[in-house]
Amino acid sequence: MKTRRQFLQWTGRCAAGCALGGISLRVLAGKGKGAEFVQPPHRYGWQIKPEACKFCGLCETACVRKPSAVKAVNDQTKCSNCVACYGHLLDKNTPDEKIAITDQVVCPRRAVGRKPFSDDPAGAYLYTIDPALCTGCARCALACNEHGNKSLFVLIRPDLCLGCNECAIARVCPHNAVERVPIYPVNDFRGLYLPGGGTVVEDAAGS
Amino acid sequence: MIFPAPVVGWLRVFILAVGCIVLSFAPVRGEEPLGCRKAEGYLIQNYREQYVPKDFPCPSRWWEYADVAALALLLGTGTWLLLSRRPSRWVGVHLACALLYFGIFRGGCICPVGTTANVSLALVHPELIGRATLALFLLPLLAALLCGRIFCGAVCPLGAVQQITAARSAEPLPERLHRKLLGIPVLVLALTALMSVWKLGFLPCLLDPYKPFFFAGHALVQKAIALAGSGFSEPGIVLAGSLTAWAVFAGVVILGRWIPRPFCRYICPFGVLLGLVSRVAFYRRRIDPDACAACARCETTCPVQAISVDRTRKPALLSLSSYQCVQCGRCSDGCKFQASTVAPG
């Protein structure tokens, strides 16, 4: 009896050891079918694919974090610095002198900021989004992408993202725009996020 | 102490709550607004060409190594507590420390429970998980091979919430119901594996009722760090999880008062793997029939109903299921004869 029990125990231990070893071997040495890249040594995060996003605004409410880790940003290299911005004003024909004081703005939290680049009132204006006010509703980005120069977009800020194993936004995103990527810093260019590190800036003329 | 003990307890809760609220409303430095160059002849075209994109940093990858190291360390200290036969109070304090680090400080989403889904996915697509995830999956299982479900009892942040909120004198569930419910985790494990392989989502993440609590804690810690050092954090209340998630959390915590460790016993898919490995562990807890006086006190003390009494035999024979035992050590606390011990074999 004693020896039989011991034999069974050692069989079980060997089986457990083999199973654990097999799993580690498979993960460390294996390569999946159609693998595009080798695994990074670290964790994955989530990011919005800029070409797939349709700015539906679900990111604002779906994120487990309130306010959402998704923020709108303006790609300064693509912005055409209009006097009146689609992402800023509801009525693009607002007279110049009223733009600064109007409450007919796209952002319900007035997060889109407008600053003159030069002293000339008919000149260029810089647009930025205050991340402390932005909740990621993407209304500004939608307007800019429908009528404007497509410079406003939304991204998941990796410093705010809580890094869920399964992203609550990805679960509800109707356009499958949220994908699992190795977690890397992102910048406010409208970039493609590559697992090799860094971002590739899309050719502004090409798109 | 001037105040009676319950008052001190409530005072602590009150101070903690006030601290959280103050932290929520504390003003945080925002990011500096975009600077405008007004130099003569500086054109908007030049500005665009020379614009330096602002980086939104991600958490350092050293955190992942730190997590693996912390898990290894906590499993090590937990094993030491177990093998040196410390009272269960020590294990409880150890568990609370683990809750503070893994649950609150790190947000609870680096938990080995969730890695069951990641590792199932990795069996088909190995490139889709990181090595840190694999380490988080393997370490508790290796510890279980050494001395049982020490992870559940001394390290798991999910288990910690349940252990802290459970009443000491909870009535055990009826044996037949308990036996039937034990099948659910196996089902959950199978579903977890299938759902990950078929890319239908990560089941443990959907089932985890403690997520809003962990995430809210983590968001507050992030905010405290941003306040103390540099970095951006939003002003106002940073909350995590929907109202439904919080309702589920509250429900499970209240239910857990009378049914200790409901998640561990009747849902957790990782517990199945740990339990299976624990059955063949090198060190296992067992009840020595020679020392046992068959008072069966441990049967009611055990929070996970791992001890069963065969009353048909005279004297009654107590047996302990290594599959269910989470190594909390309460049975040996209450035993006058030191019959419940961790022994090799």
Image (cartoon, coloured by chain):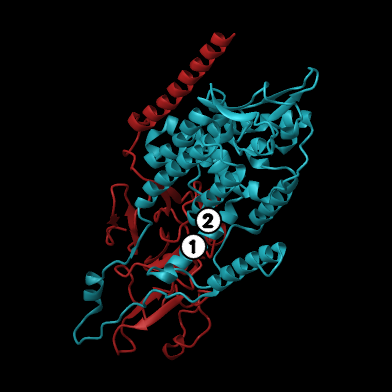
How dense is the environment of label 1, judged by Cα within 10 Å: few (below 14), some, or many (20 and up)?
some
Please give the name of the residue rendered at 35% of the width and 35% of the height, measured from the top-left corner.
A35
Pick whichever, A1 or A196, lies toward us.
Answer: A1
Please give the name of the residue rendered at 45% of the width and 74% of the height, measured from the top-left corner.
B28
**Label at residue B104:** 2
Position of B312 compared to B18: left or right?
right
Q: Looking at the picture, does residue B252 appear above or below residue B197?
A: below
Position of B162 compared to A184: left or right?
right
Task: Work out which residue is located at the far left of the displayed protein and give it.
Answer: B41
Please give the name of the residue rendered at 46% of the width and 72% of the height, measured from the top-left corner.
A132
Mark 2: amino acid = Ile
Quadrant where the C terminus of chain A lies?
A: bottom left
From this viewpoint, is residue A174 visible?
Answer: no
> Chain B colour?
cyan
Q: Quadrant of residue B297?
A: top right
How dense is the environment of label 2, judged by Cα within 10 Å: few (below 14), some, or many (20 and up)?
many
